[in-house]
Image: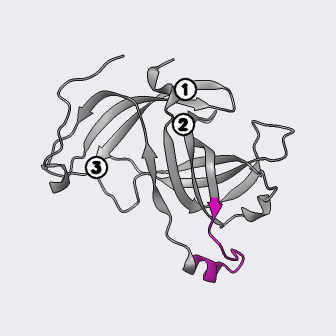
Amino acid sequence: MPSNSTCPAIIHVRDFVEHVEPDPTRPGKGLSMQLRISLNIPLKDIQSEDVEQEEIPTLVRYFDEGNQSDHYKPNTFIYSSGSFLTISSEDEEFHIIIHAHTLNRHPGNEEDTEKYFMHCPEAAQPTVALLGVVLGRGGQLNSGSTFLHYRLQTTVYNSSARTYHTFPVTAYFKNGQRWVEFLASQKNIAN
């Protein structure tokens, strides 16, 4: 097991629920639920020729301790954070699975959609905290539209299967004055 496996990758999301259903990985446990949302990483308004943008199907799995699953309905705005992992489904579609440590909904009556949406904040790009090993880097600082990017490898724990999963991640940083003083590593680190 890699040394970083005890420090999980954490993701913070705020977005609208598309669907609510029982968690299929825990049959017979009626309080194990999952929410379906679609994340956009990066945000739709960020344009770069070397970044492909598609909605990422995302499952937020949680244990409904207070038996309040009626709080989470389609079009409900949620705030959640938790450990996550990435998978490819049988149809080879990329998914994110979040094991929620926290899950809250924006107050209000989502059935009055016009009024509810008016008071909800906008869906936001997820915030991700990762620990991993840098495998490589690319891009250039302050020249053209190319993003500076780092490829790293991280390990997360899948509590449903009680296993560890290692996967690659590429982090992109937009060029600009913000990165002028950024010290890039000069060598790759290998396991």
Which comes sooner in the sequence, label 2 or label 3? 3
Which comes sooner in the sequence, label 1 or label 3? 3
Label 2: element kind: strand
Q: Which residue is mark 2?
A: 86
The image shows residue 132, relative to residue 49, as above or below, that is: above
Q: Are marks 1 and 3 in contact (CB under 8 Å)?
A: no
Using the rendered view, name the quadrant where residue 171 is placed. Answer: top left
Residue 184 point in image, percent of width and height: 19, 36
Horizontal side of residue 189 vs 111, given as left or right: left
Q: Nearer the viewer, residue 14 or 17?
A: 14
| Circle 2 Cα neighbour tier, 10 Å, few/some/many (<14 / 14–19 / ≥20) | some
Residue type of the residue flagged with mark 1? His
Using the rendered view, name the quadrant where residue 158 is placed. Answer: top right
The residue at 65%/72% (across/down) is 107
Calculate the distance from the C-alpha at mark 2 to the C-alpha at mark 3.
Answer: 24 Å
Residue type of the residue flagged with mark 2? Thr
Q: Which residue is mark 3?
A: 49
Residue 189 point in image, percent of width and height: 29, 21
Query: Marks 1 and 3: which is nearer the front?
Result: 1
Q: Which residue is mark 1?
A: 165
Q: Nearer the viewer, residue 15 or 104?
A: 104
Residue 176 point in image, percent of width and height: 17, 55
The residue at 41%/51% (across/down) is 53
The residue at 83%/37% (across/down) is 27
Residue 47 point in image, percent of width and height: 31, 57
Residue type of the residue flagged with mark 3? Glu
| Circle 1 Cα neighbour tier, 10 Å, few/some/many (<14 / 14–19 / ≥20) | some
Q: Are marks 2 and 1 in contact (CB under 8 Å)?
A: yes
